[in-house]
Amino acid sequence: ANAAEESRNPGRDIPVAIALCLLVCAALYVAVSLLIVAVVPWADVDRAAPVAQIFAQGRGHGWELPVIALGTSAGIATTLLAGLYAQSRVVLGIARESALRPLSGLATVHAHRGTPV
C-alpha cells in the first residue's frame, strides 16, 4: 500500500496485489504445514524450527540446511528492504503535509521516476 502513488491504477492494483499475496502466502503456509505433519508425527514437531527439524533428523540429503539458512537470510533482508522502502514513503508523506517543518525539504520527488529523492 505504500507504493500506491507509483501505481497506474491504485484503486484496482493495490486490492488485487494484496489479495493475490495473501492467497499465495496462505497456500504456501498450508503446503509446508501439511508436509511437516506428513513427515514428523504431530506430537513430535519442534515448534521453534519445524522445517529444519525434518532435515536435521536425517531425512534429507545434507544440502537442505544451508538452503534453509540462505532462505532465512533472504527473508530477513527482504523484510529490511521493505521496511526501508515504506519508511521513505512515510517520511515523504509527513514532509508533504508539513507536519514537521525540518522535514519539508524531503518532500521532493525525482522528476522522471516520481520516487522520493
Image (cartoon, helix red, strand yellow):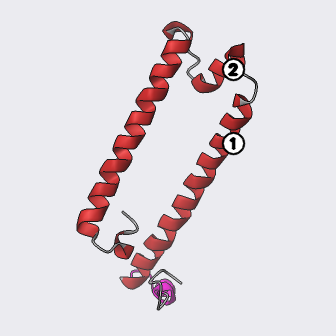
- Residue matched to label 1: 70
Report which quarter residue 6 is drawn in: bottom left
Q: Up-down: is 72 above or below 114?
A: above
71 with respect to 90 (left or right): right
The residue at the far front in this view is 61
- Residue matched to label 2: 60
Q: Up-down: is 74 above or below 94?
A: above
Q: Position of residue 87 (x, y in %)?
A: 50, 67
65 with respect to 88 (left or right): right
For the residue carrying disc 2, how many other residues have a C-alpha within 10 Å: few (<14), some (14-19), or many (20+)?
Answer: few
Quick one: quadrant of the C terminus?
bottom right
Mark 1–mark 2 CB contact (< 8 Å):
no
Badge 2 element? loop
Q: CA distance from mark 1 to mark 2?
A: 16 Å
Judge whether residue 77 can be spotted in this image.
yes
Residue shown at 69% from the left, 29% from the top: 64
23 with respect to 71 (left or right): left
User: In this orientation, which residue lies closer to the viewer: 65 or 91?
Assistant: 65
- Residue 6 — which label? none
Q: Which amino acid type corresponds to the residue marked 1 in the rendered image?
A: Leu
Report which quarter residue 65 is drawn in: top right
Quick one: quadrant of the N terminus?
bottom left
Badge 1 element? helix
Residue range highlighted in magenta: 98-109
For the residue carrying disc 1, how many other residues have a C-alpha within 10 Å: few (<14), some (14-19), or many (20+)?
Answer: few
Residue shown at 52% from the left, 59% from the top: 82
Q: Position of residue 7 (x, y in %)?
A: 35, 72
- Which mark is first along the chain, 2 or 1? 2
